[in-house]
Image (cartoon, grey):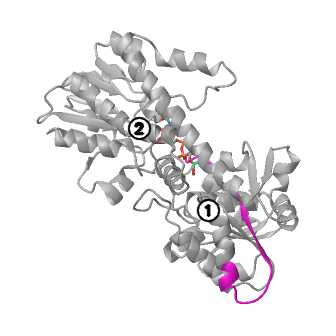
C-alpha cells in the first residue's frame, strides 16, 4: 500500500484516484476547484460516469480515499503524486502544458521527502524531461525525486471498467526505485497478469499519442470506406466485420459514424502533428485522418440535404448531443458542427439527449432548444438526425416516430436502426455506409 496524491479531479484524475484506492492504496484526490472538492465530499459526482459513484463511495467508506483542496499538504503527506490536470489544445495545435507545469512547481515547493512525480495527463514527448528540470530548479530542498510517465487509456463512458481492467499498463521510468514503487501501486494488476510495459519516459509518452492517433486513423479510414460503400451498394458493417476477422486488423474501432469527437482524439491528433513538425517529421497519415474527420461531419449534413434539399423553416430533431454514448461530455461533439450547419441552412433545430443537454447549453449552445423526451422532440419534425448511439435511441418505436413526425425522414448517423424496419415503415432514410442495401 502506497500513499498517493492525485492532482486534478477530472475524468482521468477522479477515476484513477478512486481506482488506485480500490487497488489498496491510500489516495488523496485534490483540485484547485474548491466547489468540486466540496461536491465530492458530499458524495456527489462532478461528472457522469457509469459505476463511478459506487467506486468512490466504496473507497471513501474504507477510509482509503479522500478529497482535499489543500494541494500543498497533500503533496507533503504522500509519496507518489499523479498529475492528472488538463492539457487542452494550444493555439497551433500543440498541447498546452501550463496547468501541468504549475502543478510541477507546486510539487517542487512542497518537496519534503523522496517523491515520485507521475504524469497521467496526456503530455507530449519530452514533458517528463521538462518537468524534471523544472523541479530541480524549483525544489525547496535537495530531496530526491523521480519522474515517471504512466499514461492512462480509459475511455469516457466505460472509464471505471477500463481503469480496473486495463489491456496494459505503461510505465516510463528512469530508476529502479520508481519502478518498484509503481509495481506496488499497481500490485493487483501484476497479480492478475495484466501486461506491463516498462520503458523509458519518451517511449511511454509516445505510446499514448501513437495509440490515440492510430485509433483515430482507423475511424477515419472506416468512415471513408463507408462513404464509398454508400455509393456502390455495399454494406460497411459486413466489410468491417470481415476485415476484423484478420487478426492483424482487429474488428474494434471500425464503427462508422459522424466522426470522432470528445476531449482526446481531436486534440491528441493535432498535438502529435505539431510535435512531428517541431521535430521535422511530417505526420501525413494523421493529418489525413484529421481532415477526413472534419469532412465526415459535412458528409452527414449532405445526407440530410439529400432528404430535404430546402431546409428553410424545416424542423429538424437532433437525437443525441454527447460525443458518444454513456457520457455527458459534449466537447468536440459532431452535434456542434451539424447543428451549426443546419441552422446556417435555415433549419429550426430541436434537440434531445438523455443527459448531455445541460452541458451543451452551458458550454456551447445556450440558445439551443432542448427537450425532455424523444417524443416531445420529434413532434411535427420534418427530419430526425441520430448523432449519439444511446441505448434509448436504439429502441425507438418507428411506427410511433412516424405518427408524430411531419415527414418521415431519418438520418441515422450511428447506424443503430434496423434498415429492414426503416424500409418496412416507409421512412426516407440515410445512414453511414449501408443506405443503399
Ligand atoms: C479515447 C481512447 O479510446 C482512450 O483509450 C483514451 O484513454 C482516451 O481517448 C484519452 O486519451 O483520454 P474516449 O475519447 O473517451 O477515449 O472515447 P472513445 O470510445 O475512444 O471514442 C472516441 C470517439 O471516436 C468518439 O467520438 C466515438 O464516437 C468515435 N468512435 C469510436 C467511432 O466513431 N467509431 C469507433 O469505432 C470507435
Q: Is residue 362 left or right of residue 14?
A: left
* Residue shown at the point (70%, 81%) measured from the top left: 136
Please say whether residue 74 is visible from this viewpoint: no
Residue at image location 40% in from the left, 24% down from the top = 432
Q: Relative to 185, does residue 333 appear above or below in the rendering?
A: above
Q: Is residue 397 above or below residue 18?
A: above
Kindly state the secondary structure of the residue where label 2 is placed.
helix
Task: Please state, as top left, top right, bottom left or bottom right, where the N terminus lies in the image.
Answer: bottom right
420, 110: nearer the viewer: 110
Residue 253, by quadrant, is top right
The boundaries of the magenta stretch are 135-158
**Residue that numbered label 1 is attached to:** 13
In depth, the one of 350 and 130 nearer the eye is 130
Give the image quarter of residue 5.
bottom right
Relative vertical location of residue 37 with respect to residue 256 in this rendering, above or below: below
Give the label on residue 293, or none: 2
Name the residue at 58% across, 39% down.
214
Q: Is residue 266 visible?
A: yes
Q: Main secondary structure of the magenta part?
A: loop
Amino acid at each position: 500500500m502506497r500513499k498517493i496524491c492525485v492532482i486534478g479531479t477530472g475524468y482521468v484524475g477522479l477515476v484513477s484516484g478512486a481506482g488506485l484506492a480500490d487497488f489498496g492504496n491510500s489516495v488523496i484526490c485534490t483540485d484547485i476547484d474548491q466547489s468540486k472538492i466540496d461536491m465530492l465530499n458530499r458524495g456527489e459526482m462532478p461528472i457522469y460516469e457509469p459505476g463511478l459513484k459506487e467506486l468512490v463511495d466504496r473507497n471513501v467508506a474504507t477510509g482509503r480515499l479522500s478529497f482535499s483542496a489543500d494541494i500543498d499538504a497533500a503533496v507533503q503527506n504522500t509519496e507518489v503524486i499523479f498529475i492528472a490536470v488538463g492539457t487542452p489544445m494550444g493555439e497551433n495545435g500543440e498541447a498546452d502544458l501550463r496547468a501541468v507545469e504549475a502543478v510541477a512547481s507546486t510539487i517542487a515547493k512542497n518537496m519534503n521527502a523522496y517523491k515520485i512525480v507521475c504524469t497521467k495527463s496526456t503530455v507530449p514527448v519530452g514533458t517528463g524531461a521538462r518537468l524534471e528540470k523544472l523541479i530541480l530548479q524549483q525544489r525547496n530542498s535537495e530531496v530526491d525525486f523521480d519522474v515517471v510517465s504512466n499514461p492512462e487509456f480509459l475511455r469516457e463512458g466505460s472509464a471505471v471498467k477500463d481503469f480496473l481492467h486495463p489491456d496494459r499498463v505503461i510505465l516510463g521510468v528512469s530508476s529502479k526505485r520508481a519502478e518498484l514503487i509503481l509495481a506496488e501501486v499497481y500490485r493487483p494488476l501484476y497479480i492478475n497478469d495484466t501486461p506491463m510495459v516498462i520503458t523509458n519516459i519518451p517511449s511511454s509518452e509516445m505510446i499514448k499519442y501513437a495509440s490515440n492517433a492510430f485509433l483515430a486513423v482507423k475511424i477515419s479510414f472506416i468512415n471513408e470506406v463507408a462513404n464509398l460503400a454508400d455509393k456502390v451498394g455495399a454494406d460497411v458493417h459486413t466489410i468491417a466485420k470481415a476485415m476484423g476477422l484478420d487478426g492483424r486488423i482487429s474488428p474494434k474501432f471500425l464503427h462508422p459514424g459522424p466522426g470522432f469527437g470528445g476531449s482526446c482524439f481531436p486534440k491528441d491528433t493535432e498535438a502529435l502533428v505539431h510535435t512531428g513538425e517541431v521535430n521535422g517529421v511530417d505526420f501525413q497519415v494523421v493529418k489525413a485522418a484529421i481532415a477526413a474527420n472534419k469532412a465526415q461531419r459535412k458528409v452527414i449534413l449532405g445526407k440530410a440535404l439529400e432528404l430535404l434539399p430546402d431546409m428553410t423553416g424545416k424542423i429538424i430533431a437532433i437525437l443525441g448531443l454527447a460525443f458518444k454514448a454513456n457520457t455527458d461530455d459534449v466537447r468536440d461533439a459532431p452535434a456542434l458542427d451539424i447543428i451549426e450547419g443546419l441552422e446556417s441552412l435555415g433549419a429550426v433545430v430541436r434537440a434531445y439527449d438523455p443527459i448531455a443537454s445541460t452541458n451543451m447549453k452551458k458550454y456551447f449552445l445556450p440558445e439551443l432548444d432542448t427537450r425532455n423526451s424523444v417524443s416531445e422532440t420529434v413532434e411535427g419534425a420534418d427530419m430526425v438526425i441520430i448523432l449519439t448511439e444511446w441505448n434509448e435511441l436504439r429502441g425507438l418505436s418507428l411506427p410511433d416516430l412516424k405518427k408524430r413526425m411531419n415527414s418521415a425522414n431519418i438520418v441515422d448517423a450511428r447506424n443503430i436502426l434496423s434498415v429492414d424496419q426503416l424500409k418496412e415503415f416507409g421512412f426516407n432514410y440515410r445512414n453511414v455506409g449501408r443506405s443503399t442495401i
